[in-house]
Amino acid sequence: MVLFHGLEGNSRSHYALALARELRARGWRGVVPHFRGCSGEPNRLARAYHSGDSAEIGWVLARLRARLAGPLFAAGVSLGGNALLKWLGEQGAAAGNLVSAAAAASAPLDVTISGDALARGLNRLYTRHFLATLKPKSLAKLAAHPGLYDPRAVARAATLREFDNLVTAPVHGFRDTDDYWSRASSRPLLGRIRVPTLVLNARNDPFVPPACLPAPGEAGPGVTLEFPAEGGHAGFVSGPFPGNLRWLPRRLLEFFAGALPDRQGKRE
């Protein structure tokens, strides 16, 4: 199983560690590739990563498929989930050549709605958290790529919309934030997905408001839409206080186990 992490996440993110524990308990192998610049080592190119980076998803999956025998399952959380769903929709039935099934948890299916939600209320605290790493990385990149963008404007950016307009959009070939967020959104492509896929979003996710969530008719055949009432953003805490993070990885692995052919092992 491969897991694509969220914005400024990595293999040490809480959901990645929780998944690793469940994979180990089941005897499954897992890998968490780092998006460019998220491993602790700066990316050498001007580009970084973004919510609609489906080409990067395909490149990673093709490399893994070439090295592995047996079923390959792909999951993504938040940004990684959106990019994975976008790739699945773009590829259609051809995605089945690389993956047996897929899942996305807490994906910002409509990046515009989610991006603007992060500029309101308590969500602004999370925006500051993201910008606290995004801005230093971007400013450091100017040493190797001078003139890529205005460092003073980047330093002043207070929202993801402002940051993406200055950095993410122009560096990755988008006209502006609106163009980037619109073209990066996976929701318009859900109807073209043709491999078994779980789309899991909590209805109380502050980053993904209910307006982001698709109706059943928007998803392709084999797509399972699950919108539990609670779970927050990539949390899904369960059990008595203070709770644990086992619910999400167990749900993902339950879905994938159900996609295994009988000869691969007992269905769960």
Image (cartoon, rainbow, N blue to C red):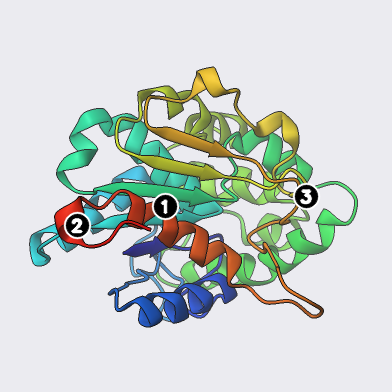
Label 3 environment density (alpha carbons within 10 Å; few <14, some 14–19, many ≥20): some
Q: Which residue is tagged 3?
A: 206
User: CA–CA distance between discs 1 and 3?
Assistant: 25 Å
Q: Position of residue 151 (x, y in %)?
A: 62, 61
> Quadrant where the N terminus lies?
bottom left
> Quadrant where the C terminus lies?
bottom left
- Left of 28 or right of it: where is 181? right
The answer to whether residue 80 shows anywhere in this view is yes
Q: Which residue is tagged 2?
A: 71
Q: Position of residue 188 (x, y in %)?
A: 49, 24
Q: Earlier in the sequence, mark 2 or mark 1?
A: 2
Q: Residue at x 9, y 60 (%)?
A: 66
Judged from the image, the secondary structure of the residue bearing numbered disc 2 is: loop
Q: Earlier in the sequence, mark 1 or mark 3?
A: 3
Amino acid beneath label 3: Pro
Label 1 environment density (alpha carbons within 10 Å; few <14, some 14–19, many ≥20): many
